Image: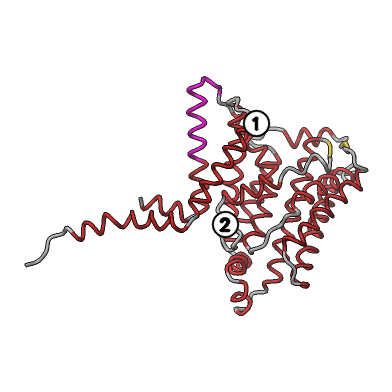
């Protein structure tokens, strides 16, 4: 019971435990149904991870400082369009342009919020509409092809059977972010800002800079994810690349983050993304209807929300203490 309490209290541990449990369940069901298990299944999971992972990571960083970036979907589409349009003369130039756009957009939103003392929801909602509108303007409301098929093949080529260039980049981003949050002063300041902004400011933390940096990272990661996906598809479309918001939010919540700030870590978000990707790939492989995916995902999110409730944790904690209390009560008494 003590282990259960520790898992419930730690969002990252809980997310990885849930992922392992779901993976074991899918393997058991697949074997009992006679379905083949191969590296292609893992490759499909990690390809989805490469699409949603960086976006969820950026959103998670803003939630860590008690803010919320709604503009991720708009920046995701804009980054892809910019990369394809600029990358015709060189893919690296296109990626650099997308990163620059994401960085500028994130910084601009952070500056508006901190200088004018505005709420992140209102500002980033405006950012969502602005970035999405710019993508439509740049592409003329049409799909833009990317003529370099060699880049698309390289993006999707299997590495060690289950990885691709995109998924390796996504994992590298998570590892770097996890190291920054866990081992640097910037990471500690982010946690402090999200936990108690006023106390952090009194302690000398530049909370405005932390918030601007979090949104700069979110914009950059979303634009980079859109650029890499557009290269892998050999096309960019502002309309077809906008369904990342709900999976990203779900992944961050599954990973242990909270709108109250100060909680949730990059590796927990990675586990949350893996859970969603495993559900998509596993349920599809089992022949489950697409609408069932949403039902299962919603049920898991509800279970996680219940697990986050203080009443459940208190009850588990009380249950773990009961055996020791009973032992002390029934122990030998001195005469």
Residue 294 part of the magenta segment: no
Residue 246: give x, y in percent of width and height.
68, 46
Residue 323: give x, y in percent of width and height.
26, 54
Q: Quadrant of the C terminus?
A: bottom left
Residue 61: give x, y in percent of width and height.
65, 58
Residue 25 part of the magenta segment: yes
Span shown in magenta: 20-36
User: Sequence order check: which comes first, mark 2 or mark 1?
Assistant: 2
Q: Nearer the viewer, residue 39 or 202?
A: 202
- Give the number of the disc on residue 290: 1
The picture quadrant where one finds residue 244 is top right
The picture quadrant where one finds residue 115 is bottom right
Q: Nearer the viewer, residue 38 or 331?
A: 331
Mark 2: few, some, or many residues within 10 Å (few <14, many ≥20)? many
Q: Which residue is mark 2?
A: 264
Q: Marks 2 and 1, how far apart in space?
A: 29 Å
């Amino acid at each position: 019971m003590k282990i259960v309490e520790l898992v419930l209290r730690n969002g990252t541990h809980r997310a990885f435990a849930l992922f392992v449990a779901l993976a074991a369940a899918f393997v058991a069901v697949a074997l009992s149904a006679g379905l083949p298990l191969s590296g292609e299944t893992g490759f499909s999971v990690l390809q989805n991870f490469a699409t949603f992972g960086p976006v969820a990571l950026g959103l998670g960083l803003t939630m860590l400082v008690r803010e919320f970036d709604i503009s991720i979907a708009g920046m995701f589409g804009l980054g892809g369009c910019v990369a394809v349009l600029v990358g015709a003369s060189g893919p690296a130039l296109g990626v650099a342009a997308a990163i620059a756009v994401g960085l500028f957009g994130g910084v601009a939103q952070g500056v508006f919020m901190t200088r004018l003392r505005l709420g992140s929801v209102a500002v980033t909602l405006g950012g969502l509409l602005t970035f999405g509108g710019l993508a439509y303007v740049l592409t003329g409301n049409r799909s833009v092809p990317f003529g370099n098929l060699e880049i698309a093949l390289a993006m999707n080529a299997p590495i060690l059977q289950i990885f691709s260039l995109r998924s390796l980049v996504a994992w590298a981003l998570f590892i770097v972010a996890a190291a920054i949050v866990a081992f640097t002063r910037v990471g500690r300041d982010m946690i402090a800002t999200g936990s108690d902004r006023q106390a952090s400011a009194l302690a000398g933390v530049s909370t405005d800079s932390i918030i601007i940096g979090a949104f700069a990272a979110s914009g950059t990661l979303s634009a980079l994810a859109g650029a890499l996906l557009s290269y892998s598809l050999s096309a960019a479309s502002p309309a077809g690349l906008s369904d990342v918001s709900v999976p990203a939010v779900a992944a961050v919540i599954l990973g242990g983050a909270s709108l109250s700030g100060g909680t949730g870590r990059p590796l927990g978000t990675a586990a949350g993304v893996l859970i969603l990707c495993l559900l998509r790939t596993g349920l599809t492989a089992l022949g489950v209807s697409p609408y069932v995916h949403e039902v299962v995902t919603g049920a898991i999110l509800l279970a996680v929300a219940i697990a986050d409730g203080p009443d459940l944790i208190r009850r588990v904690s009380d249950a773990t203490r009961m055996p020791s209390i009973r032992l002390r009560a029934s122990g030998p008494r001195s005469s």
